[in-house]
Image (tube, coloured by chain):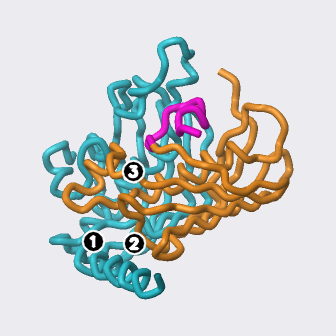
Chain colours: A orange, B cyan
């Protein structure tokens, strides 16, 4: 799944991702961090690190592809918490486990993202219906 | 006022990830207001097909957050010596997105520093477009680390992976 196709919206990530495991309440998504991602030119010059917000974006895209709720129109409306525990570099393989919990008119997605070097981030995102224009 | 040239001294970010245009108010007491103008020339819009409607131009929420964090980073840079240090987004909590942002909008970031130590600072605040609140940030932790420390960290991780393999 490409990033733009997954979200139907612009994204700072060019790389697509793959859903490698999925059941009703759990999923796993993976992506290889492309060295030619546009963000690396400026984050940071001569020392490329994937921005933490791009790890959140990877999780958001994977979540939108696997949310248990019916129908389109969902999007991230809240970051309950995000802790960044290790750097992600160009070429790393990012694997993220997603666990879903229903809330009051929303869905919560708890995610752990890891590279081959260890855990990169632990994140909890809230999803609700996207406002209509 | 801190304008574009000075911002490059305060932040290590560069195009296309330098997402603050100007600091408009720096009270010098741990509070700051900064702006970022959103334009459809940003690379995130490069692949949007022509046939899609206006909603296809919603600015990525995570970049609204990144932009706000960089405004906080200007305050963090004032508190910590820079040199060859890398600014890292340590953690964030209670962030709520409450409005959409599109090309032509100007983000106004309001940042308040809650705590500042040598290598760690904590912030809260919000982002507005005109009178409309588009994001609130309950808590952001920014850490600064020497580049060499990060390089050592990844070198050790890779050496460990080689041994495991």
The residue at the far front in this view is B165
Q: Which of labels 3 and 1 is toward the front?
A: 3
Helix, strand or loop at label 3? It is loop
Secondary structure mainly formed by the magenta segment = loop
Q: Do labels 3 and 1 share a chain?
A: no
Residue A18 lies, in percent from the top left, at 61, 49
Q: Is residue A23 above or below residue B97?
A: below
The Cα–Cα distance between marks 3 and 2, rounded to whole angstroms, is: 31 Å
Label annotation for residue A34: 3
Label annotation for residue B115: none
Asked if the stretch drawn in magenta spans residue A12, the answer is: yes
Quadrant where the image shows the N terminus of chain A = top right
User: Which residue in the structure is indicated by mark 2?
Assistant: B121
| Discs 2, 1 touching: Cβ within 8 Å | yes
Q: Quadrant of residue A79?
A: bottom right
Disc tally is 3
């Amino acid at each position: 799944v490409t990033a733009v196709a997954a979200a139907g919206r612009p994204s700072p990530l060019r790389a697509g991702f793959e859903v490698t495991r999925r059941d009703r309440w759990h999923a796993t998504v993976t992506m290889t961090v492309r060295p030619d991602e546009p963000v690396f030119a400026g984050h940071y010059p001569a020392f490329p690190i994937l921005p933490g917000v791009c790890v959140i974006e990877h999780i958001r895209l994977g979540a939108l592809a696997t949310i248990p709720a019916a129908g389109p129109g969902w999007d991230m409306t809240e970051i309950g918490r995000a802790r960044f525990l290790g750097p992600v570099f160009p070429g790393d393989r990012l694997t993220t486990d997603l666990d879903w919990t229903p809330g009051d008119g929303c869905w919560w997605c708890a995610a752990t993202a890891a590279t081959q070097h260890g855990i990169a981030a632990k994140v909890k995102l809230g999803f609700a219906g996207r406002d209509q224009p | 006022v801190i304008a574009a040239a000075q911002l490059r001294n305060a932040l290590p970010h560069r195009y296309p990830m330098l997402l603050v245009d100007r600091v408009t108010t720096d009270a010098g007491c741990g509070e700051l207001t900064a702006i970022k103008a959103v334009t459809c020339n940003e690379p995130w819009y490069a692949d949007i097909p022509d046939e899609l409607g206006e909603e296809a131009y919603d600015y990525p929420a995570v970049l609204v957050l990144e932009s706000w964090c960089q405004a906080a980073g200007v305050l963090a840079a004032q508190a910590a010596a820079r040199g060859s240090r890398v600014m890292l987004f340590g953690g964030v909590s209670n962030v709520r997105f409450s409005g959409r942002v599109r090309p032509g909008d100007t983000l106004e970031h309001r940042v308040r520093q809650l705590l500042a130590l040598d290598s760690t600072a904590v912030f809260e605040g919000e982002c507005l477009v005109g009178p409309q609140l588009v994001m609130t940030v309950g808590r952001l932790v920014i850490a600064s680390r020497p580049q060499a420390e990060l390089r050592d960290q990844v070198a050790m991780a890779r050496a460990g992976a080689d041994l495991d393999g």
